[in-house]
């Protein structure tokens, strides 16, 4: 019986089970150990790469800010030595004020970053003032000019010597003793004006639109993993991912500051020029910025429109903190995704123990490449490599959010090719595909990097013209597109000529809803087709709604 028992199928099966589990557990322990080593290595490498990239991004942003203020200082010195201004100071002829104003208008229109350009005399009286007027610079009439004798920025700037620059605190503009609404971040920069005899005759003052600086930081954030913050010397947000946290020092009784919410982190940041801090909430990468150079000065300023500065501030005391914050959620998401992949790959590896380690590395690489390909296929048109309808709507949603936040305007161009079907029928579908690729290349040439060109399907395209600086900016873009698409296109099958019917809708003039804006642009495009083709039309509620 014992021999029979040992030779029975049931006994062999039971022993095979025990051996199977022994081998399985041993192999599983080895593979699990290798997977854990790989997991930790990937997490460590990912964190190291993230730290390096974030540090590089912050350094690049801080250098850009320093270069920006060097450029503004250059404008100041140019204006303080302006020939027309020196002639006015020498001769006192009021006609020179017209020439000064003309020069100011040209500079304001060209730079697009100055809310006001002014020349004030020794008594603080505005002699010339140019207002930006949302892209339409204009001179203020002489009877509307004001005395700024009691304003801190005039007093502090007028005390400087020749060649010195005054930079005010970065705060919100105040009009009629109240913070201007909507909020207008502002930095005032000035320098004394001396005549040919070396006598101080007033100051030149630039009101720099702080939103320009903040927008530059936001735009650079799009290529960074972190979220950009800008803090003043006291730890208050000048720029935050949460706009409600910004400018807390300007509002009485409000304790909205980085230093208040993150006291331990702030204690480390303010004691070092740069560095990185990995905390339970995420990774902070920071660098101190000194906008003032030697020979520049500032002051504490005053929220009271006619209050005097409490103290002078030298070039080392005037500083900001540029911080890039990568939330813990981003780091955790990567770790969770990686763990799930390893579990999936591990199941397959246990089935082929002999080649387990090699299969793991090969499968991970293949899976990552496959995911990248799937992402590309999901978001980009396979023929033209342009964003498809899905990615177009995603970018449209992002542009709408940014435009609402900064009260900006953008346009949508809906483009339908004229004569495409004729080319497709006469020269063949391969020629049609080649033509669409040529059209995509030409559309890319017509827009800025910040704009989006997408293929919605067939011979229909759409363009998001972001941050329009002028009311007719979208029309100019449409005209440029029509012009370039009207030129002959050389194909392997022969030359082709087409046109384009374009419809335009504007945010927020026509609508603030993305889908509605696209429908409006589509409606305007059909109006262009009915009106003769190869032209553009602005959306209007009076346009007919029926399609071809």
Image: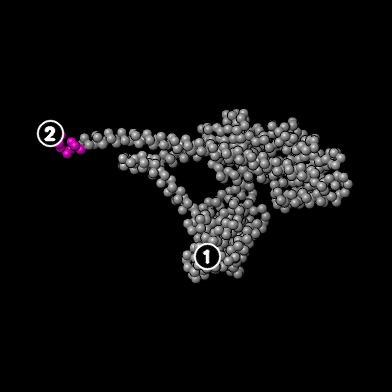
Answer few, some or many: residues within 10 Å of disc 2's Cα (few below 14, many 20 plus, some between 14 and 19): few
Magenta: main secondary structure equals helix
Q: Is residue 286 left or right of residue 298?
A: left
Q: Residue at x 18, y 38 (%)?
A: 10
Query: Where's residue 204, x and y in %?
Result: 78, 42
Residue situated furthest front in the rendering: 492
Query: Where's residue 133, x and y in %?
Result: 72, 50
Answer few, some or many: residues within 10 Å of disc 1's Cα (few below 14, many 20 plus, some between 14 and 19): some
Q: CA distance from mark 1 to mark 2?
A: 85 Å
N-terminal-most mark, 1 or 2: 2
Q: Quadrant of residue 520?
A: bottom right
For the residue pair 394 and 4, the one nearer the viewer reads as 4
**The C terminus - image quarter:** bottom right
Q: Mark yes or no: residue 246 visible.
A: no
Residue range corresponding to the magenta coloring: 1-13
Looking at the rendered structure, which numbered label has been put on residue 3? Answer: 2
The residue that mark 1 highlights is 491
């Amino acid at each position: 019986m014992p021999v029979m028992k040992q030779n029975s199928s049931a006994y062999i099966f039971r022993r095979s089970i025990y051996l199977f589990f022994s081998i399985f557990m041993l192999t599983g322990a080895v593979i699990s150990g290798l997977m854990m080593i790989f997991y930790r290595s990937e997490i460590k490498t990912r964190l190291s790469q993230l730290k390096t990239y974030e540090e590089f991004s912050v350094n690049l942003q801080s250098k850009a800010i320093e270069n920006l203020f060097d450029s503004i200082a250059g404008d100041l010195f140019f204006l303080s030595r302006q020939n027309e201004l020196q002639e006015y100071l020498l001769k006192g002829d009021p006609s020179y004020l017209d020439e000064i104003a003309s020069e100011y208008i040209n500079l304001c229109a060209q730079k697009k970053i100055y809310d006001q350009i002014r020349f004030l005399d020794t008594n603080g009286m505005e002699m010339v003032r140019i207002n930006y007027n949302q892209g339409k610079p204009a001179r203020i009439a002489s009877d509307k000019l004001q005395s700024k004798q009691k304003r801190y920025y005039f007093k502090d700037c007028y005390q400087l010597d020749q060649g010195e620059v005054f930079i005010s605190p970065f705060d919100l503009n105040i009009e009629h003793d109240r913070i201007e609404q909507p909020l207008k971040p502002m930095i005032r920069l000035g320098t004394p004006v001396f005549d040919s005899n070396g006598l101080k005759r007033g100051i030149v003052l630039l009101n720099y639109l702080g939103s320009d600086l903040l927008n530059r930081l936001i735009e650079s954030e799009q290529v960074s993993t972190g979220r950009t913050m800008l803090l003043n010397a006291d730890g208050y947000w000048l720029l935050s991912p949460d706009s409600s946290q910004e400018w807390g020092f300007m509002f009485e009784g409000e304790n909205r500051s980085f230093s208040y919410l993150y006291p331990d982190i702030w204690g480390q940041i303010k004691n070092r020029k740069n560095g990185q801090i990995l905390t339970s909430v995420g990774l902070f990468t920071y660098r101190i910025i000194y906008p003032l150079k030697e020979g520049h000065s500032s002051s504490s300023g005053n929220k009271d429109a006619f209050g005097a500065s409490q103290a002078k501030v030298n070039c080392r005391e005037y500083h900001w903190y540029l911080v890039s914050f990568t939330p813990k959620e981003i780091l955790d998401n990567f770790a969770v995704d990686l763990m799930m992949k390893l579990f999936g790959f591990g199941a397959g590896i246990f089935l082929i123990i002999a080649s387990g380690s090699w299969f793991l590395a090969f499968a991970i690489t293949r899976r990552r490449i496959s995911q990248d390909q799937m992402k590309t296929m999901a978001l980009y048109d396979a023929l033209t490599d342009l964003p498809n309808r899905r990615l177009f709507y995603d970018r449209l949603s992002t542009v709408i959010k940014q435009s609402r936040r900064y009260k900006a305007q953008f346009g949508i161009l809906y483009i339908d090719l004229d004569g495409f079907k004729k080319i497709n029928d006469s020269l063949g579908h391969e020629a049609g595909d080649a033509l669409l690729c040529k059209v995509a290349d030409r559309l890319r040439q017509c827009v800025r990097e910040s704009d989006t060109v997408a293929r919605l399907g067939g011979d229909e395209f759409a363009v998001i013209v972001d941050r329009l600086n002028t009311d007719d900016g979208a029309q100019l873009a449409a005209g440029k597109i029509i012009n370039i698409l009207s030129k002959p296109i050389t194909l392997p099958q022969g030359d082709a000529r087409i046109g384009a019917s374009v419809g335009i809708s504007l945010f927020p003039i026509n609508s603030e809803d993305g889908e509605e804006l696209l429908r409006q642009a589509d409606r305007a495009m059909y109006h262009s087709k009915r009106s003769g083709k190869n032209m553009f039309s602005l959306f209007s509620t009076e346009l007919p709604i029926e399609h071809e």
